[in-house]
Image (cartoon, grey):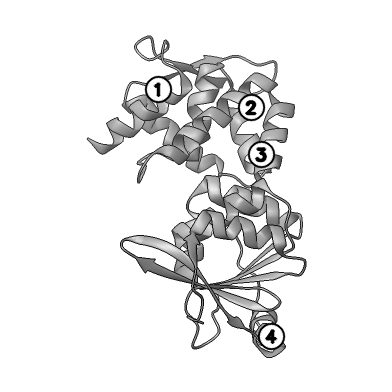
Amino acid sequence: MADSSETVSVQTAIRLIFEQATEPLYLLRPSTELLEIVIEIATDQESPPLHVLTTEPELKAVRNHFPSASRAADLVEADRLTLTAVVPEGWGTAIVTTETAHAFAHVDGNELVVEGANLSTEVREICRDCRDAHEPFDLRTPPWSGVISTLTETFDAEVGADFETTIETLEALEDPAVNVADSALLVAARHELLLYDLSHWAEDIRLYSKATLSRAKSDLEEFGIVSCEKVQIDVGRPRKRLTLTEEFASLSEAELLRELDAVRRE
């Protein structure tokens, strides 16, 4: 697998492999970082189905990172991605096409892709059999397209756009102390939404439970970022409207999330 004379950067190589592929691809034993890169590239361009075979800890790490997990869920729903917590014995990190295995190597601190030797169909059969013998890994994350569409339908397009902004900020943070529940609550407070309505939306799409959002809301209140006011309804107990406190009301969505991230780290 090391008989190639040329190496290229990971992103460039993967994009080229995807562009040239006409049959399903197998990605073996990727790191969390590599898997997130591949998910992003697969989201950006059309490609044949990708079957990922890797360890459960790596898949759990992706599941715990909402931006990547929700994009991966979109690909799974579109039958363009499968995730399986198993790896064929004797293999390192590689992308297997119909004829070639592309290995990954670290050279001078950079991760590179090296084109390997031609493969027999037996190798792909091993990958396929390994995948078929195990249940798909459950991301437990709603597809990104569904998150935004249901959020927009439930509230409005501005709420959806602001939520997208917070998720982009969340993705840019290194080892964030905030999560998607915080993002949703900050946007809801910006638009003075009812906690009841936000909780129902989050539960309906399997994003978060009411209890989880309630605990996160209590944290934001304790930090002095969010406050709640009771709203009387026609029937039943009063409900809570989320609002930003005066100190934080002038901040943008991205600034709010960064401020909360800093507070959680203190």
N-terminal of the pair, mark 2 or mark 1, is: 2
* Pointer 3 local density, CA inside 10 Å: few below 14, some 14–19, many at least 20: many
Q: Amino acid at mark 1?
A: Glu
Residue occupied by mark 3: 147
Name the quadrant containing residue 12: bottom right
Side of 45 relative to 255 (left or right): right
N-terminal of the pair, mark 3 or mark 2, is: 3
Tell me how far mark 3 sits from mark 1, CA to CA: 22 Å
Which quadrant is home to the C terminus? top left
**Residue that appears at 44% across and 16% down:** 244
**Residue that appears at 70% across and 57% down:** 19
Which percent across, then down, holds residue 166? 50, 30
N-terminal of the pair, mark 4 or mark 3, is: 4
Contact, CB < 8 Å: mark 3 with mark 2?
A: no
Of residue 219 and residue 164, the one placed in the foreground of this image is: 164
- Residue 221 is labelled as none
Q: Amino acid at mark 2?
A: Gly
N-terminal of the pair, mark 3 or mark 1, is: 3
Residue occupied by mark 1: 255
N-terminal of the pair, mark 2 or mark 4, is: 4
Residue occupied by mark 4: 129
Is residue 159 shown to the viewer in this render?
yes
Of residue 203 and residue 153, the one placed in the foreground of this image is: 153
Q: Amino acid at mark 4?
A: Asp
Residue occupied by mark 2: 160
